[in-house]
Image: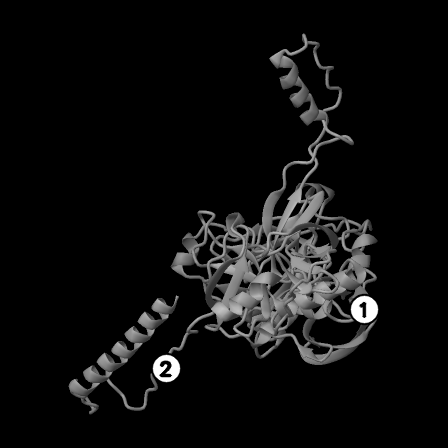
């Protein structure tokens, strides 16, 4: 080690001397008008850490290996073991085979499998943080310390929405804990350290930088991942990502890889998201998130213009949970939530987390845009988990609505034809009984509606935030918008019970290319709800 250090110092001295000599012997470049160089341009200097050995030595004892065992399913009605003469080799074979199948207490525990990593956050209480998927379906969980001591662990709680879990170990050994840092202070380009158990190789240390922040990898409603180029592989899941101060600023969770190995694209849950979840798991054994009772979607430039907003941002209410907090507070479809409890909603995806982290039962002020002006109301924040348990997030209204009579009406200005919804239509296009409005019966080829994915069977519920009762209503509302010189109209669309807003141009002139285009049948991307996402509906992000 001393020889290595001496060589490193020698190389550094030689390199410095050589660099100085080159600088003195190289003629200066011209900086006149024809020169590429500019004396006013600052050249950044890059200073990476000289060594991380001292820091890693302190952090390693806090990182653990997580393994588990699962009970093997018992085969019922197994036949009795055949009788063989004493000493027969078949006797030993069948005894071993039958023992494996029957086991003790109704089944046999499979050998421990190394699943992932974790880290100790409370040495006195023995709290260990890992990913929820690391302990998924485990009958017994074991934690192995850095000194190879293995002990059973109790699962205090887990949260699949954020993929976090909290374990507890009981031991007389002195444990080493690490603390959470502020992930919000980390910048793209900052150095990080990842420690974990890739492929069962415990205590593996890798380094890299933060490649990006706030990544949404479509794994849950609160995605806000830190991306890194540090080598993260299978088995690193649940392990800590440290800043250079030795604080946990992320929990390594996922990688992007076509091969299964690291290609320099890894993702970690930020500590600012993980910390409150871990605190709740420690206190309640489960999460208790705020809930608002709305589904939302992004405010695009077209939608912003049609609503009279001067910029994109906020969260557009696509639907509300009946009797939910938002509906009770007077919010409606088409409202754009711009501020919640004093916090700006700069983008749709930010609202679910803001609501989730709000105290249950708190009366918060909500600022929203409706009919061309700002409005305010107060919402009493509910509890997401309780709403899920009582079925509020999945129940559908069973109201029967009378069918509208009349023939279809074509509106060439938007390339759509409308007709009443018949009982046959409801069956064919899976239109819920509580959805009212007019059905799209035709989409003109090459129209903007076709390009945006409008389809036969879609139901138009509102036009410019006005309810639509029949096909002639739809045509009249569109004509009224044209007469008032509006450039766009806003439609609230329902497809198989999922609602979304779409804006269409009223002054678009079809081109020759447009006329050749075929009708687009591809469904547009599903709206992102802000609160009620279930395990079977990962494409919908409720607002809680």
Quarter assignment of residue 268: bottom right
Query: Which is nearer the N-term, disc 1 or disc 2?
Result: 2
Q: Which residue is mark 2?
A: 44
| Mark 1 surroundings within 10 Å by alpha-carbon count, few (fewer than 14), some (14 through 19), many (20 or more) | some
Q: Which residue is mark 1?
A: 360
For the point 80% across and 71% down, the residue is: 330
Percent coordinates x, y for residue 119 in the rendering: 63, 60
Q: Is residue 392 left or right of residue 309?
A: right
Percent coordinates x, y for residue 477 in the rendering: 66, 66
- Between residue 403 and residue 81, name the one nearer to us: 81
| Mark 2 surroundings within 10 Å by alpha-carbon count, few (fewer than 14), some (14 through 19), many (20 or more) | few
Q: Vertically, is 146 above or below 377?
A: above
In the rendered view of the protein, which quadrant contains the N terminus? bottom left
Percent coordinates x, y for residue 490 in the rendering: 62, 66
- Between the C-alphas of marks 1 and 2, the distance is 48 Å
Percent coordinates x, y for residue 168 in the rendering: 73, 56
Q: Vertically, is 434 above or below 506?
A: above
């Amino acid at each position: 080690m001393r020889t290595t250090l001496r060589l490193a110092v020698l190389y550094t001295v030689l390199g410095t001397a050589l660099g100085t000599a080159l600088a003195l012997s190289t003629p200066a470049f011209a900086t006149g008008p024809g020169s590429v160089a500019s004396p006013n341009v600052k050249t950044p200097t890059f200073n990476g850490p000289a060594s991380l050995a001292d820091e890693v030595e302190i952090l390693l004892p806090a990182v653990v290996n997580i393994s588990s065992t699962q009970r093997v399913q018992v085969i019922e009605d197994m036949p009795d073991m055949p009788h063989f003469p004493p000493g027969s080799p078949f006797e030993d074979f069948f005894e071993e085979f039958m023992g494996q199948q029957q086991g003790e207490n109704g089944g046999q525990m499979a050998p421990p499998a190394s699943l992932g990593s974790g880290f100790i956050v409370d040495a006195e209480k023995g709290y260990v943080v890992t990913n929820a998927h690391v302990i998924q379906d485990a009958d017994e969980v074991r934690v192995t310390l850095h000194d190879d001591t293995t002990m059973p662990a109790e699962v205090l709680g887990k949260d699949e929405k954020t993929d976090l879990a909290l374990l507890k170990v009981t031991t007389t050994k002195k444990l080493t804990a690490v603390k959470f840092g502020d992930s919000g202070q980390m910048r793209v380009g900052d150095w990080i350290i990842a420690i974990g158990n890739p492929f069962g190789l415990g205590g593996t240390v890798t380094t890299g930088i933060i490649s990006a922040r706030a990544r949404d990898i479509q794994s849950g409603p609160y995605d806000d991942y830190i991306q890194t180029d540090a080598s993260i592989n299978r088995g690193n899941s649940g392990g800590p990502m440290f800043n250079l101060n030795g604080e946990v600023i992320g929990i390594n969770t996922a990688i992007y890889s076509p091969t299964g190995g690291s290609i320099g694209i890894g993702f970690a849950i930020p500590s600012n998201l993980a910390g409150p979840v871990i605190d709740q798991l420690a206190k309640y054994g489960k999460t208790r998130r705020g809930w608002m009772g709305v589904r939302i979607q992004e405010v695009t430039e077209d939608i912003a213009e049609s609503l009279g907003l001067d910029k994109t941002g906020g969260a557009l209410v696509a639907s509300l949970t009946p009797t939910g907090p938002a509906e009770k507070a007077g919010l409606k479809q088409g409202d754009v939530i711009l501020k919640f409890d004093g916090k700006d909603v700069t983008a749709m995806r930010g609202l679910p987390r803001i609501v989730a982290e709000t105290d249950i039962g708190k009366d918060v002020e909500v600022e929203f845009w409706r009919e061309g002006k700002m409005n305010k109301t107060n919402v009493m924040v509910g509890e997401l988990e309780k709403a899920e348990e009582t079925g509020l997030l999945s129940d559908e209204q069973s109201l029967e609505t009378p069918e509208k009579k009349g023939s279809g009406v074509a509106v060439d200005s938007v390339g759509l034809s409308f007709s009443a919804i018949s009982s046959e239509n409801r069956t064919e296009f899976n239109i819920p009984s509580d959805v009212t409005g007019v059905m799209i019966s035709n989409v003109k080829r090459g129209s903007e509606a076709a390009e945006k994915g409008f389809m036969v069977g879609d139901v138009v519920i509102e036009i410019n935030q006005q309810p639509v009762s029949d096909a002639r209503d739809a045509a009249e509302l569109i004509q009224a918008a044209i007469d008032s010189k509006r450039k766009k109209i806003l439609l609230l669309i329902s497809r198989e019970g999922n609602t979304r807003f779409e804006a269409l141009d009223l002054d678009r002139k079809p081109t020759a290319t447009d006329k050749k285009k075929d009708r687009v049948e591809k469904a547009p991307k599903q709206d992102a709800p802000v609160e009620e996402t279930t395990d079977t509906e990962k494409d919908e992000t409720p607002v809680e």
